[in-house]
């Protein structure tokens, strides 16, 4: 449900998923920085930040009913899928949880883009 209006109610599930995904990516990023194999995680770490930023932008676009929100969510889904793939390369708990959240967000973004 929207906070000030009900105009974005149809996108609320995607908005919530993008917010959670951004948080998961930033948390995973922070944990990855402390892993002993950080050098092996360079692609993952940069993708985590890109995914988090894209999710945050998607929340903004949907919240203001932006004219390119659907196209933005299509791209967000692609980035979330890439982030899921990167995180799945590492078996630690934080990467596995983040990968799961990225998959869920990609699914929600695709649904939103197809509305």
Image (spheres, grey):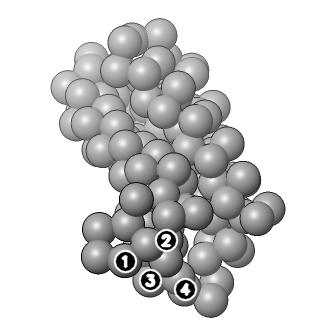
Mark 4 closeness class: few <14, some 14–19, many ≥20 residues within 10 Å? few
- Precedes in sequence: disc 2 or disc 4: 2
The 10 Å Cα crowd at callout 2, few under 14, some 14 to 19, many 20 or more, is some
- Secondary structure at badge 2 equals loop
Cα–Cα span, label 1 and label 2: 7 Å
Residue at image position (67%, 42%) is 107
Q: Which mark is residue 5?
A: 1
Real-space Cα distance between discs 3 and 2?
8 Å
Q: Which residue is mark 2?
A: 8
Q: How many marks?
A: 4
At a point 43% along the width and 29% down the height, the residue shown is 98
Q: Which element carries disc 4, helix, strand or loop?
A: loop
- Answer with the quarter of the image where residue 105 lies: top right
Task: Work out which residue is located at the far right of the displayed protein and give it.
Answer: 114
Seen from the viewer's position, the closer of residues 10 and 85 is 10
Near mark 3 (Cα within 10 A), the count class, few <14, some 14-19 or many ≥20, is few
Q: Taking 43 as reference, is 76 left or right?
A: right
Task: Verify CB contact (< 8 Å) between mark 1 and mark 2.
Answer: yes
Residue marked by disc 3 = 64
Give the spatial CA distance, label 1 vs label 4.
15 Å
Considering only vertical position in the picture, is 12 above or below 107? Answer: below
Considering the numbered disc 3 on the image, is that residue within a helix, a strand or a loop? loop
């Amino acid at each position: 449900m929207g906070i000030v209006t009900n105009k974005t109610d149809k996108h609320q599930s995607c908005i919530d998923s993008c917010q959670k995904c951004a948080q998961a990516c930033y948390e995973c990023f922070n944990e990855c920085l402390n892993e002993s194999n950080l050098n092996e995680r360079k692609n993952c770490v940069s993708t985590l930040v890109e995914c988090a930023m894209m999710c945050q932008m998607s929340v903004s676009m949907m919240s203001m009913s932006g004219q390119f929100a659907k196209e933005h969510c299509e791209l967000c889904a692609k980035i979330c899928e890439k982030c899921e793939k990167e995180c799945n390369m590492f078996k630690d708990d934080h990467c596995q949880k983040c990968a799961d959240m990225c998959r869920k967000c990609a699914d929600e973004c695709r649904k939103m883009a197809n509305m």
